[in-house]
Image (cartoon, grey):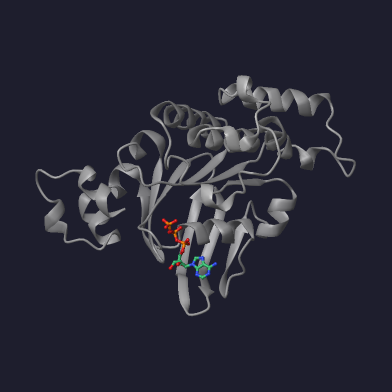
Amino acid sequence: MSAIEVDHLVVRYGEVCALDDATLRVGEGRVTALIGMNGSGKSTLFKAIMGLVRPDSGEVRVGGSSPSAARRRGLVTYVPQDEAVDWNFPVSVREVVMMGRYGHQGSARRPRRADHIAVADALARVGLTDKADRQIGQLSGGQKKRAFVARGIAQDARILLLDEPFAGVDKRSEATITRLLRELAASGRTVFISTHDLHGVRQLADDAVLLKRHVLLHGPVDEVVQPDHLALTFGLDPRDLGAGKDLGDLDGVM
Ligand SMILES: Nc1ncnc2c1ncn2[C@@H]1O[C@H](COP(=O)(O)OP(=O)(O)OP(=O)(O)O)[C@@H](O)[C@H]1O
C-alpha cells in the first residue's frame, strides 16, 4: 500500500519550476531515500507533502487524505533542514519533543501523564534524556536532528519526512538515527528521507527515488543507487563513474 501518492505534481516559485510533473508512490512501512542534487526539488516535494506549498497543478494524497487534513490529524511529521529552524527560540529540548503531543492534548494543551511518558520515552530512544532541559540551540547539529526525530516519535505519526538528517551530523548521531528509522519502519511507520549520504543509503533505505524536478527512477535501493543512474541524476558523464570508481566520487558534486 502507498502512504504517499504524488501525481503529476508541478510547483513553481515565480519563474523557477521546482517540480515538473513529479509522480511517485511511497510504500507504507518502508524507508525510502530521496536523492537529487542541490535544487532538484527535494525540500519542495516534502513541503508539498506537508501542505506547506501549494501545487500549481497535480495532486498529493497522504494516507488517503489531503496534505493539510493529514497534518491536522497528526498523521505526518516533518524534520526540516537546519536552516528552516530558529535555534534561538527559548524552548527546551523537552518542550520541542512535547510539541509532538499537541494533537493528543485537546484544545487545553495541558500535558497529561501519557504525554510526559511519551516524551520521556522518545527522548530515551534518541539518547537525549540527559539533555532534556537544555535550550534547543545549545545542542550539537546531530543532537538537534535527534530532538526533532524524538518529536516525530512522540507524535506517534505514521509517516515521517526527514530533510537531510545526516548533514553535519557526527557518526554516533548518524548511527542512532539510522537504527531508529529502521525500527520505526519495522513497526509499520513510513519513512521518507532526503540524503546526500550515498555510502549509508543501502543500510538505511529499502527503496530509493532519484529526483531531478521529476522522478527519474524509483525502486529497490540496490537497483537504483548505481553509478549510471547517479550520473544521470547529477548531470555527470557516466564514464567518469565507470570501473574503479565508487559512490564516493560523487561526494564533491552533491
Ligand atoms: N521560496 C522559494 N522562492 C523561490 N525559489 C525557491 C524557493 N524555494 C526553493 N526555490 C527554488 O526551487 C528549486 C528547488 O529548491 P528545493 O529547495 O526544493 O531543492 P532541494 O533539492 O531541496 O535543494 P538542496 O539539496 O539544496 O536543499 C531551486 O531552484 C530553488 O532555488
The answer to whether residue 239 is left or right of residue 158 is left
The answer to whether residue 7 is left or right of residue 61 is left
Q: Is residue 149 above or below residue 26?
A: above
Q: Where in the figure is residue 217, as x and y percent of width and height?
A: 35, 57
**Res. 212 image quadrant:** bottom left
Residue occupying the point 39% across, 29% down: 171
Q: Is residue 178 above or below residue 228?
A: above
Residue placed furthest toward the right: 108
Residue occupying the point 40% across, 62% down: 40
Q: Where in the figure is residue 233, as x and y percent of width and height?
A: 30, 59
Q: Is residue 78 above or below residue 5?
A: above
The answer to whether residue 156 is left or right of residue 215 is right
Q: Where in the figure is residue 155, as x and y percent of width and height?
A: 69, 37
Q: Can residue 147 be seen in this snapshot?
A: yes
Residue placed furthest toward the left: 243
Q: Can residue 81 be seen in this snapshot?
A: no
Q: Where in the figure is residue 53, as x and y percent of width and height?
A: 61, 65
Count numbered badges in the picture.
Answer: 0
The answer to whether residue 39 is left or right of residue 53 is left
Residue occupying the point 65% across, 58% down: 67
Residue occupying the point 63% across, 61% down: 52
Q: Name the residue nearer the viewer: 92 or 46.
A: 92
**Res. 139 image quadrant:** top right
